[in-house]
């Protein structure tokens, strides 16, 4: 099971460790944080204790409103469920019983100057990506005109060469050879690299090139939301290449459905241009426009006019 160490999270957000530093090796397995307001009031039926516990202004103000002995009792009730850590927002002064009990229990207590909702938004986004289910596939991932493209095909078919042409046209590489796919939601799939191959593109007969060194910073980005899955295949003479009347195809990655098209290769064909056209066509469909539907409407209007 994937996890994030509390210490790594603290470094990522530059959190001040107030108490429980010996517990920074504790692990976070859940991707959303929790504000323990009801639990401080004594209601634990739905306590999400595996999550990062965030003390905003309301939680800390309520805790401080109690007598100190009661504060300690409420904090110990929280700690009895063994949460991974606590984060106090808005740079607040921390109630002494909370600091003391966290130190005794070796549960990290940290503080940030950020406002509660701003910090929670950033933390949840970070954890969602870090803990997202993921798979690695063979292919190339690109951002073409702001649209995430997964480029697949058999080894040697020319995926990297097509990617190189697109990069020269101003589009961006995300990953070559090994593409890591992360599921952020039932409809959101993110493509990224495996860190080792970051910024590298492998071209047959040439070898590895660093696209940032060769074409500048704008030639690369770390991740992109996958919108299209394009498979490059060998040209088949008698295959049906006009897909006007065909049902849309989809690929399934981690139970996320991605529109899928096939582009057949033949000498002289502008494959990079076709991929740009596919990306732009997908964008227009998201805006509610379909060239096929408009074409059919015109055909029907012509038929009506000639009756």
Image (cartoon, rainbow, N blue to C red):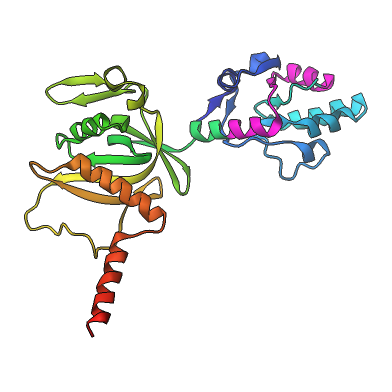
Q: Position of residue 214 (x, y in %)?
A: 26, 19
Write the residue at 91% across / 25% down: 69
Horizontally, residue 238 falls left or right of residue 19, namely: left
Res 168 → quadrant: top left
- Farthest right residue in view: 67
- Which residues lie in the magenta part? 95-124
At x 15% / y 37%, what residue is drawn?
157
Quadrant where the C terminus lies? bottom left
Q: Position of residue 77 (x, y in %)?
A: 79, 32
Q: Is residue 170 left or right of residue 242?
A: right
Q: Image height check: is 304 above or below 247? A: below
- Residue at the far front: name it: 305
Residue 1 visible from this viewpoint: no
**113 up-or-down from 138: above or below:** above
* Nearest the eye: 299 or 76: 299
Where residue 180 appears, as percent x and y from the top left, is: 36, 33
Q: Does the magenta-highlighted stretch encompass residue 126?
A: no
Toward the viewer: 146 or 66? 146
Which residue is at the far bottom? 307
Residue at 40%, 45% in the rendered image: 254
In this image, 265 relative to 2: left or right? Answer: left
Secondary structure character of the magenta stretch overall: helix
Dividing the picture into quadrants, the one containing residue 271 is: top left
Residue 280 position in % (x across, y down): 32, 47
- The answer to which image quadrant residue 198 occupies is top left
In this rendering, position of residue 59 left or right of residue 169: right
Give the number of marks. 0
**Residue 98 showing in the rendered view:** yes
- Pick the front one: 48 or 196: 196
Q: Residue at x 20, y 35 (%)?
A: 162
């Amino acid at each position: 099971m994937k996890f994030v160490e509390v210490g790594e999270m603290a470094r990522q957000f530059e959190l001040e460790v107030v108490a429980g530093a010996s517990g920074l090796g504790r692990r976070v397995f859940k991707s959303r944080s929790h504000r323990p307001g009801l639990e401080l009031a004594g209601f634990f039926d739905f306590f999400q204790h595996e999550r990062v516990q965030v003390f905003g202004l309301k939680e800390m103000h309520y805790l401080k409103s109690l007598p100190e002995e009661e504060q300690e009792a409420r904090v110990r009730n929280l700690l009895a469920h063994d949460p991974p850590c606590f984060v106090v927002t808005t740079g607040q002064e921390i109630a002494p019983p909370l600091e003391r009990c966290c130190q005794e229990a070796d549960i990290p207590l940290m503080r940030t100057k950020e406002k509660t909702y701003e910090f929670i938004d950033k933390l949840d986004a970070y954890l969602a990506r870090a803990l997202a289910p993921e798979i690695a596939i063979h292919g190339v991932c690109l951002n073409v005109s702001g649209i995430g493209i997964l480029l697949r095909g058999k080894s040697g078919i020319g995926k990297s060469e097509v990617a190189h042409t697109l990069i020269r046209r101003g589009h961006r590489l995300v990953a070559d050879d090994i593409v890591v796919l992360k599921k952020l939601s039932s409809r959101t799939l993110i493509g990224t690299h495996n860190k080792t191959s970051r910024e590298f593109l492998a071209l047959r007969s040439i070898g590895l090139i660093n696209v940032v060194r060769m074409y500048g910073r704008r030639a690369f980005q770390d991740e992109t939301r996958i919108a299209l899955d394009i498979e490059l295949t060998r040209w088949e003479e008698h295959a049906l290449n006009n897909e006007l009347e065909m049902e849309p195809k989809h690929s399934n990655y981690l139970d996320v459905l991605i529109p899928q098209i096939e582009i057949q290769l033949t000498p002289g064909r502008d494959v990079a241009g076709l991929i740009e056209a596919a990306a732009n066509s997908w964008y227009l469909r998201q805006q509610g426009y379909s060239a096929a539907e408009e074409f059919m409407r015109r055909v029907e209007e012509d038929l009506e006019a000639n009756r």
